[in-house]
Amino acid sequence: MLALALPAALAACAPMPAERSPAPIVAGGWQAADPKGEGVQPAAAYAAEHLPQGTGQLAEVTSAETQVVAGTNLRMVLRMTDGARWRVTVWHRLDGSFELTDAQKTP
């Protein structure tokens, strides 16, 4: 009888597999953001207004990421009404103003 009870007792004491926890937030690292989020849309509109002349109007934000700095950097991919796609970075300063810090047309 002991020979049957011992394996069951040992199995009950075995450590349970740890639950998978979400990835830790890395200070200063890029974090995914909702492309339709209220913090993303004003920055996307600002970027679209400051792209070169002849670029269509903003159709949608296809992806967005944020990075906390002295304010917030928003890195986004914009699809324009002319079909062009732009990868842009906008700095949202602590005073509420924006600055387009990078814009690259993507294939």
Image (cartoon, rainbow, N blue to C red):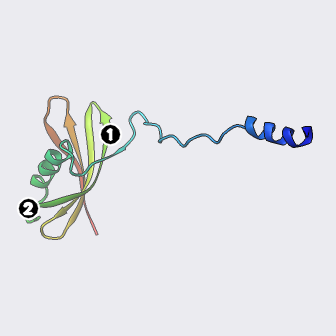
Residue linked to disc 2: 53
Residue linked to disc 1: 67
Question: Could you tell me which quadrant the C terminus lies in?
Answer: bottom left
Q: Residues within 10 Å of mark 1 (few under 14, many from 20)?
A: some
Q: Residue furthest front?
A: 1
Instruction: Please indicate whether residue 93 sits to the left or right of residue 31 in the image.
Output: left
Question: Could you tell me which quadrant the N terminus lies in?
Answer: top right
**Relative height, residue 51 to residue 83 (above, below):** above
Q: Residues within 10 Å of mark 2 (few under 14, many from 20)?
A: few
Which residue corresponds to the image point at 74% horizontal and 37% vertical from the top-left?
A: 12
Which residue corresponds to the image point at 80% horizontal and 37% vertical from the top-left?
A: 10
**Relative height, residue 105 to residue 66 (above, below):** below
Look at discs 2 and 1 and give the one toward the viewer. 1
**Relative height, residue 64 to residue 85 (above, below):** above
SS type, badge 1: strand
The one nearer the camera, 1 or 15, is 1
Distance from label 2 to label 1 (Cα)?
Answer: 28 Å
Instruction: Please indicate whether residue 11 sits to the left or right of residue 60 in the image.
Output: right
- Whole-percent x, y for residue 83 in the image: 17, 70
Tell me which amino acid carries mark 1: Gln
Which residue corresponds to the image point at 13% horizontal and 55% vertical from the top-left?
A: 48
Which residue corresponds to the image point at 19% horizontal and 29% vertical from the top-left?
A: 94
The one nearer the camera, 22 or 65, is 22
- Whole-percent x, y for residue 66 in the image: 30, 42
SS type, badge 2: loop
Chain-order first, disc 2 or disc 1: 2
Instruction: Please indicate whether residue 45 sits to the left or right of residue 36 in the image.
Output: left
- Whole-percent x, y for residue 24 in the image: 47, 37
